[in-house]
Amino acid sequence: MPVPVSLRSVDIGYGATSIVRDLNLEIAPGEFLVLLGPSGCGKSTLLNAIAGLTELAKGEIWIGERNVTWADPKDRGIGMVFQSYALYPNMNVEKNLSFGLHVAGVAKDEIARRVARASGILQLDPYLKRRPSELSGGQRQRVAIGRALVRDVDIFLFDEPLSNLDAKLRTELRVEIKKLHHELASTMIYVTHDQVEAMTLANRIAIMRDGVIQQLATPREIYQRPANLFVAGFIGSPAMNLLSGSWVASGDGVKFRSSMVEFDLSGRAFSGAERDVVAGLRPEQITVGSNTGLPEVEATVSVIDAMGPETVIWCTVGDTLMSVRVSGDFAGQVGDIITLGLDLANASYFDQNDGLRLTQ
């Protein structure tokens, strides 16, 4: 049965250096939670603390109904997959999968059952007699996942397991891990700095910065309604376009004014007015062409990134560089002057001073 994980007022540090500060996090049974953030944000440290590999300075970790804050890793009911495959080179796949169970004294027939189950789920049957040197990178990582799977545990922890693979293998293994979660319905906690992995795998994403969770929400919520400027700039490829400006009083409402455009926001459910703000527009919230019914600006095409079914064009508007997502048959050229329509009515707005999202 899947179990919940609860992190309560967790502090982690080394000497005078604080890594994670007063962190609270509730992970539901069977949830696939991704810890996402830049290098050094504390995500791997937090995962290691859940695994029992890093001690807490303060707080508690609960797995199900057990307080495991000071329990040994072997007693926490977890299976962990690391960035490095760390397979035994002199053992074949079958022995790599079963070695830990033999050491733990598990009965032979039970070992055979667990290895067969993991091998079937991960499609390793054709490779059971091969050594790691005879496998591809993706196959080796599947063996590493299988070694955690045979432990028959409640929770799986993944620490950037795909970062050593090429792009094609990463895509294939993402599908395998997603299928694995659907089949097992186990609680999974996954660390990555790759937002594509996070957006495609997670039920919820916890975006971290300097040891603090900036936003905890579904991938859709994070993409559409980022909680602050850090999240807005971190999530999205390309990232959200950010336009500095201000809200000024306009009749009974408010108007957004920047160096490039003005737009009446009257009737929108914004809290307060007369403040410095940042308008955030996703690349798909900008339209190429005139007479769009949107506030329009002229821009110069600087770079064209053709990516098959879609194209991302980078344009300069004054001193501002903006990204626009258009169809793959875009016919423009670098240096062209084009008109951009900005969907400011549906933009995200943030306070310039504290970076927090403004209610809308």
Image (spheres, grey):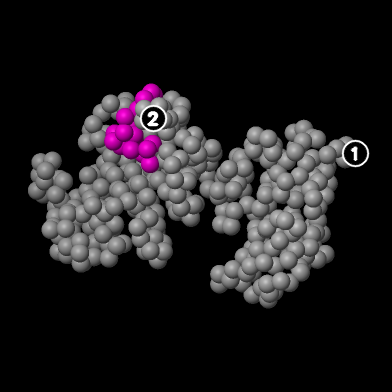
Would residue 128 be visible to someone looking at this image? no
Q: Would you place residue 100 above or below residue 323 in this image?
A: above
Residue under pointer 2: 13
Query: Viewed as shown, does residue 308 lie left or right of 316?
Result: left
Q: Quadrant of residue 267?
A: top right
| Residue assigned mark 1 | 251
Instruction: Name the amino acid type tagged 1.
Output: Gly
x, y percent for residue 86:
23, 52
Q: Is residue 157 magenta?
A: no
Q: Which mark is residue 62?
A: none
Q: Position of residue 2 (x, y in %)?
A: 34, 39
User: How many C-alpha atoms fall within 10 Å of the one at disc 1: few (<14), some, or many (≥20)?
Assistant: few
Per the image, label 1 sits on a secondary structure element best described as: loop
Dot 2, crowdedness within 10 Å: few (<14), some or many (≥20)?
A: some
Q: Nearer the viewer, residue 220 or 315?
A: 315
Picture residue at 25% right of the left edge, 35% below the top = 73
Query: What segment is highlighted magenta in the picture?
Result: 44-64
Q: Of the residues tagged 2 and 1, which is closer to the observer?
A: 2
Chain-order first, disc 2 or disc 1: 2
Viewer-proximal residue among 196 and 211? 211
Q: Residue at x 79, y 50 (%)?
A: 259
Q: How many marks?
A: 2
Q: Does the stretch in magenta take in 54? A: yes
Q: Position of residue 164 (x, y in %)?
A: 35, 57
